[in-house]
Amino acid sequence: MNVSVIGTGYVGATTSAALAELGHQVIGVDVDQKKVGMLNAGRLPFYEEGLETLMQALLKKGALAFTTDLARAVTGSDILFLTVGTPSQADGSANLRDLEQAVRQIGRALNGHKIIVSKSTVPVGTGERVKAWLQEEVTKRGLSIPFDVVSNPEFLREGKALHDALHPERIVIGCESDKARAMMTKLYQGMQTDFCYTTVRDAEMIKYASNSFLATKISFMNELARLCEQTDTSISKVAHGMGLDSRIGSQFLRAGIGYGGSCFPKDVEALLHLARENGVPLRLLDAVATVNREQSGWFLQKVRTALGTLSGKQIALLGLTFKPGTDDIREAPALKLIPVLLAAGAQITAYDPKGMEAVGRLHPKVRCAKDAYAALDGADAALLLTEWPEFLKLDFARVIGSMRKALFFDGRNALDGAKMRSYGFTYDGVGERGTA
Ligand SMILES: NC(=O)c1ccc[n+]([C@@H]2O[C@H](COP(=O)([O-])OP(=O)(O)OC[C@H]3O[C@@H](n4cnc5c(N)ncnc54)[C@H](O)[C@@H]3O)[C@@H](O)[C@H]2O)c1
Ligand SMILES: O=c1ccn([C@@H]2O[C@H](COP(=O)(O)OP(=O)(O)O[C@H]3O[C@H](CO)[C@@H](O)[C@H](O)[C@H]3O)[C@@H](O)[C@H]2O)c(=O)[nH]1
């Protein structure tokens, strides 16, 4: 099938490659000329393991191309995916400006029946708005062209994007016609997974509900971690014991410095906004967001208490991205901590395998080190904020000799506390006092 993917960011670039790999002819569209130039040259504008190599092969094969010419892409396609950003607005609602712009452009170029599919995360009811925008543009042209609007939310994780796009645990298809259902099924034929067919509105809600539920698991554990510290219990051990129950599941029970990224914080806020709009307060989810907002401050308080003051102290940050495996710093906990540390008079040295450039641009006062050892050299305290595998393999006997004070705060419970203490560190995790 001929497919267009509109918006070639994290989701769009991955979706383009995955659909081309499935055997479709794919054209990725973006308004950002520089991005399109890089993609056509086989270079990914962000870091995602394995994606660049696959993309290069698909470009070479002619199965994939990128353009800024949306109209041309529309006319040559059977299915059009919308993968533009839907960021948070001040009131928590999703900003649909880019989506509307892309949809109206499609409407102005529509030349026959197409399926318009939202992969962007959008609030319940957006499908109907998409339909209305398209209809308005087609009517303005004095034409009557049939089209279908489908919701096919994306569940990929950054850092595992290609794997998730090629091997999804489920494919949710919200559609209202047999034709759309048949075409979407044909598009994904060959993918061995569960298909969930529903209405467009249900599909839109499934996406927000899924992210909000995962965020709830994390905030539950983060709040519980605070109690573990007061009751001489270990949150990691508690999580392990809980996770053995298949009704609970072992994933997303890792306590830490709070969830970040471009999805959880924004999607929780968007669902809360939708709830307020409909007069149905989601009190539990409200608390999930509050716990998350507090978590990095709660963590920093431990550092402040141990050091007496942050003023004049050299703080080493290990990890800046919101999770390992990505260069994405959107809503990364590090971005909450850096301004507070700087305002308190601390000096920051930082190292991250992929996130230095973006953080350096935002915070020129942060000293970017060439590696973890250089970041830790002379530090009064080390804060591990992202559990990159290379941090777990550091030579801590070497590290302890180079730090001014052997204070180590593990914001991800990624290291073995007993081992760290055996090197001589004063080691503190999140909810792990019980392992001391
Ligand atoms: N990042 C993720 O892991 C992830 C996973 C699942 C779902 N989502 C959802 O997918 C959507 C996209 O997220 P992302 O992280 O890929 O965003 P992104 O910001 O990385 O990419 C969006 C792209 O859309 C382009 N764009 C904006 N307006 C356009 C237009 N009119 N025409 C063509 N291109 C346009 C931008 O230039 C940008 O390249 C969001 O709704 C997000 O919530 C994201
Ligand atoms: O037990 C856990 C698991 C995750 N996190 C944090 O939660 C955030 C999000 O992690 P993850 O879900 O792995 O990354 P994302 O790439 O943001 O993926 C989420 O958001 C995407 C965008 O909507 C969805 O498609 C995915 O299914 C959903 O997992 C990160 O800051 C993690 O450090 C924890 O603190 N504890």
Image (cartoon, rainbow, N blue to C red):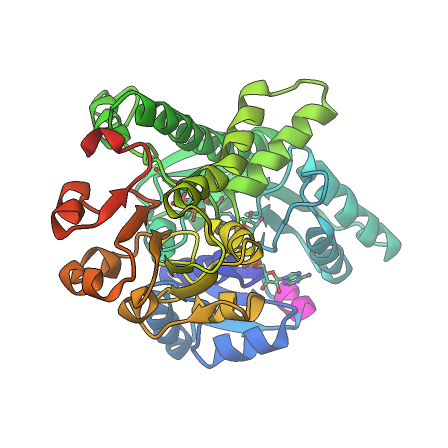
Instruction: Determine whether, in the image, residue 186 is placed left or right of residue 381.
Output: right
Query: Is residue 1 in sight in this rendering?
Result: no
The structure residue drawn at horizontal position 33% and vertical position 23%, both measured from the top left corner, is: 230
Residue 108 x/y as whole percent: 77, 60
Depth check, front residue: 183 or 98 = 98
Residue 189 x/y as whole percent: 37, 47
Could you tell me how many numbered marks the image carries? 0
Instruction: Determine whether, in the image, residue 102 is placed left or right of residue 208.
Output: right
In reply to whether residue 233 is colored magenta, the answer given is: no
**Compared to 135, does 244 lie above or below?**
above
The structure residue drawn at horizontal position 88% and vertical position 54%, both measured from the top left corner, is: 140
The structure residue drawn at horizontal position 44% and vertical position 76%, both measured from the top left corner, is: 43
Instruction: Determine whether, in the image, residue 279 is placed left or right of residue 425.
Output: right
Q: Quadrant of residue 277?
A: top right
In reply to whether residue 74 is colored magenta, the answer given is: yes
**Compared to 274, does 354 lie above or below?**
below
Quarter in which the C terminus is drawn: top left
Depth check, front residue: 76 or 48 = 48
Q: Quadrant of residue 162?
A: bottom left
Residue at the far front: name it: 308
Depth check, front residue: 414 or 175 = 414
What predominant SS class does the magenta segment belong to? helix
The structure residue drawn at horizontal position 27% and vertical position 33%, both measured from the top left corner, is: 432
The span shown in magenta is 70-75
**Compared to 191, does 181 lie above or below?**
above
Residue 396 x/y as whole percent: 17, 59
Query: Is residue 247 in sight in this rendering?
Result: yes
Residue 73 x/y as whole percent: 62, 67
Q: Quadrant of ligand 1?
A: bottom right
Instruction: Determine whether, in the image, residue 174 is placed left or right of residue 415.
Output: right
